[in-house]
Amino acid sequence: MKDLVSISPFFISKHVPSSLAFYRDRLGFEVTFQGLEPDDIYFGIVQRGGVEILLKHIGVTPVPNYTRDVKMGIASWDAFVYTPDPDALALEFASRDVAFFRPLGNTADGLLGFEIEDADGYVLFFGRTNPVNESQ
């Protein structure tokens, strides 16, 4: 049986060049594709390690999960990004003046991490299970 290695979320973007710049400049991703024409960048891909995000402008407004969660707070993330060291990553992002949607801390679900809202309003959780909760 073959193992699965990664997944690439596909986000609708209001303006792909702005989204690409956010991921590159604020979160340290590499822009691996943008196009299709230099004056018409309606699709792009960013990557950092095994994390890849596809961005596309299709003429509709992005609808991040928390906007349709009916204020219940149970489906606020659009992507969970595993990182073995959320503390170090939070420091890196803070050094780039990234605004945190929710700061580094423990969640009610036993995770340790933080949330970032991207240029289109998508919320990404960067974190891992919290070893303190694993022993319980």
Image (cartoon, rainbow, N blue to C red):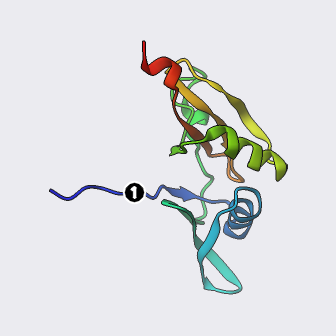
Where is residue 33? Give x, y as percent: 57, 77
The residue under label 1 is 6
Picture coordinates of residue 69, whole percent (x, y): 55, 29
The picture places residue 21, in percent across and down from the top left corner, at: 74, 66
Seen at 68% across and 87% down, the residue is 38
Most foreground residue, 50 or 37: 50
Q: In which quarter of the image is residue 90?
A: top right
Label 1 Cα crowd, 10 Å radius (few <14 / some 14-19 / many 20+): few
- Is residue 122 found left or right of 74 in the rendered image? right
**Quadrant of image for the N terminus:** bottom left
Between residues 42 and 59, which one lies in front from this camera angle? 42
Q: Foreground: 72 or 107?
A: 107
Viewport quadrant of the C terminus: top left
Answer with left or right where residue 118 lies relative to residue 128: right
Residue occupying image coordinates x 69% and y 43%: 88
Which residue: 65% across, 78% down?
Answer: 41
Against 80, residue 41 (above or below) is: below
Circle 1 sits in a helix, a strand or a loop, which is it?
loop
Above or below for 113 versus 73:
below
The amino acid marked with disc number 1 is Ser
The answer to which quarter of the image holds residue 57 is bottom right
Front position in the image: 29 or 17: 29
Percent position (x, y) of residue 63?
58, 45
